[in-house]
């Protein structure tokens, strides 16, 4: 039965730490609720508080979560690395226990996945992984939602990941694509292959990989925390740049995706990023809508 806001009652989730943990039904539930919540404002999470711990910088993740809570009339408290006692020796266990007394949910952007798991272990309120060294589930869910909206289906869609296959966003998205039967191609040098066990095919040559692609997906060649390896990584991955020449080899209606921030002229050229095939800014907008659904499922 729908509630006073017209939302269907749904079974509550516990945490969102990895897309590997989600079933197809979980994801479908999130997407259905995303459609319901997209244009809704009101006291959906009234009197609920979200604590946000960020060890790394953020634009879209912070803005989308805070905006989501604002639109649903809840509150969000942001903690940068310097705002908490974690940097001065307090344990994740103690932080989790204390924040659980103040907040109804915790969003965390941490350097290490093992710390994310520890945070969830000792928290008595839901924990949402807002990026760590292994995964970025919120981004991946928004990405798959975008593909579904643009392509009107998921099964059989050919998605090609270019560049750094060991990227945390790729890991989360590969798990989701595998669940829904997408044809997953990763085009990268062998030492940059994904670090997760899933069904995908490696095609080293990007020109061969993108043939008949429905989706071209690329991310930065140098992720946060890898700045010391920048020169080497840029040299290794330069032939995987998503440019107009590569784009022409894919299907005419191929969609171009990038989770942002983008380094224009490095992993992607501006003409492709701003071109007719790009859905990059729709993808960014969908972070807000999908996260409203995630927050509702975890905190309502």
Image (tube, rainbow, N blue to C red):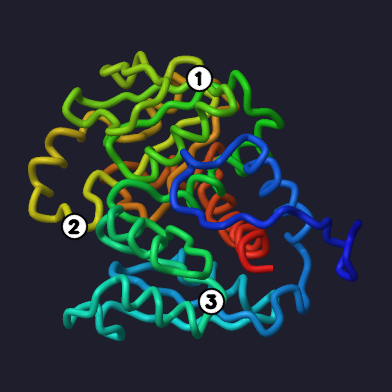
Does 229 sit above or below residue 197? Answer: below
- Front residue (pair 94, 271): 94
Q: Where is mark 1, residue-wise? A: 183
Q: Position of residue 139 (x, y in %)?
A: 48, 51
- Front residue (pair 137, 93): 93
Q: Position of residue 27 (x, y in %)?
A: 63, 42
Residue positioned 63% across, 35% down in the render = 24
Q: How many neighbours does mark 3 have within 10 angstroms: few (below 14), some (14-19), or many (20 or more)?
A: many
* Count of marks placed on residues: 3
Q: Secondary structure at mark 3?
A: strand
When asked about the image quadrant of residue 285, the answer is bottom right
- Front residue (pair 36, 50): 50
Q: Where is mark 3, residue-wise? A: 50
Alpha-carbon span between mark 1 and mark 2: 30 Å
Q: Position of residue 184 (x, y in %)?
A: 45, 23
Residue positioned 44% across, 33% down in the render = 174
Can you say which quadrant of the picture contains the C terminus?
bottom right
Q: Earlier in the sequence, mark 3 or mark 1?
A: 3
Alpha-carbon span between mark 3 and mark 1: 37 Å
Alpha-carbon span between mark 3 and mark 2: 26 Å
Horizontal arrangement in the rendering, residue 138 relative to residue 42 (left or right): left
Horizontal arrangement in the rendering, residue 42 relative to residue 187 (left or right): right
Q: How many neighbours does mark 1 have within 10 angstroms: few (below 14), some (14-19), or many (20 or more)?
A: some
Q: Earlier in the sequence, mark 1 or mark 2?
A: 1
In contact (CB < 8 Å): disc 3 and disc 2: no
Residue positioned 67% across, 64% down in the render = 296
- Front residue (pair 260, 51): 51
Residue positioned 36% across, 56% down in the render = 117
Q: Where is mark 2, residue-wise? A: 225
Does 282 sit above or below residue 214? Answer: below
């Amino acid at each position: 039965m729908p509630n006073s806001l017209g939302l269907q009652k749904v079974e509550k989730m516990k945490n969102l730490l990895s897309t590997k943990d989600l079933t197809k039904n979980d994801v479908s539930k999130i997407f259905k609720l995303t459609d319901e919540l997209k244009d809704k404002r009101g006291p959906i999470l009234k009197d609920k508080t979200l604590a946000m711990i960020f060890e790394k910088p953020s634009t879209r993740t912070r803005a989308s979560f805070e905006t989501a809570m604002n639109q649903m009339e809840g509150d969000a408290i942001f903690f940068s690395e310097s705002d908490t006692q974690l940097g001065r020796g307090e344990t994740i266990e103690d932080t989790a226990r204390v924040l659980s007394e103040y907040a109804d949910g915790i969003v965390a952007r941490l350097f290490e996945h093992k710390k994310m798991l520890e945070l969830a272990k000792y928290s008595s309120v839901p924990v949402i992984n807002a990026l760590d060294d292994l995964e970025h589930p919120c981004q991946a869910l928004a990405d798959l939602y975008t593909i579904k909206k643009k392509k009107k289906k998921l099964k059989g869609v050919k998605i090609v990941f270019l560049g750094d296959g060991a990227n945390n966003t790729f890991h989360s998205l590969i798990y989701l694509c595998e669940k829904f039967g997408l044809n997953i191609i990763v085009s990268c040098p062998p030492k940059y292959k994904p670090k997760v066990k899933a069904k995908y095919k490696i095609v080293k040559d990007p020109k061969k990989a993108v043939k008949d692609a429905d989706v071209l997906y690329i991310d930065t060649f140098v992720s946060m925390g890898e700045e010391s390896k920048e020169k080497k990584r840029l040299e290794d991955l330069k032939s995987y740049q998503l440019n107009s020449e590569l784009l022409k080899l894919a299907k005419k209606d191929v969609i171009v995706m990038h989770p942002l921030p983008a380094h224009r002229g490095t992993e992607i050229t501006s003409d492709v990023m701003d071109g007719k095939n790009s859905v990059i800014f729709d993808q960014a907008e969908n972070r807000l809508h999908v996260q409203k659904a995630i927050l509702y499922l975890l905190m309502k």
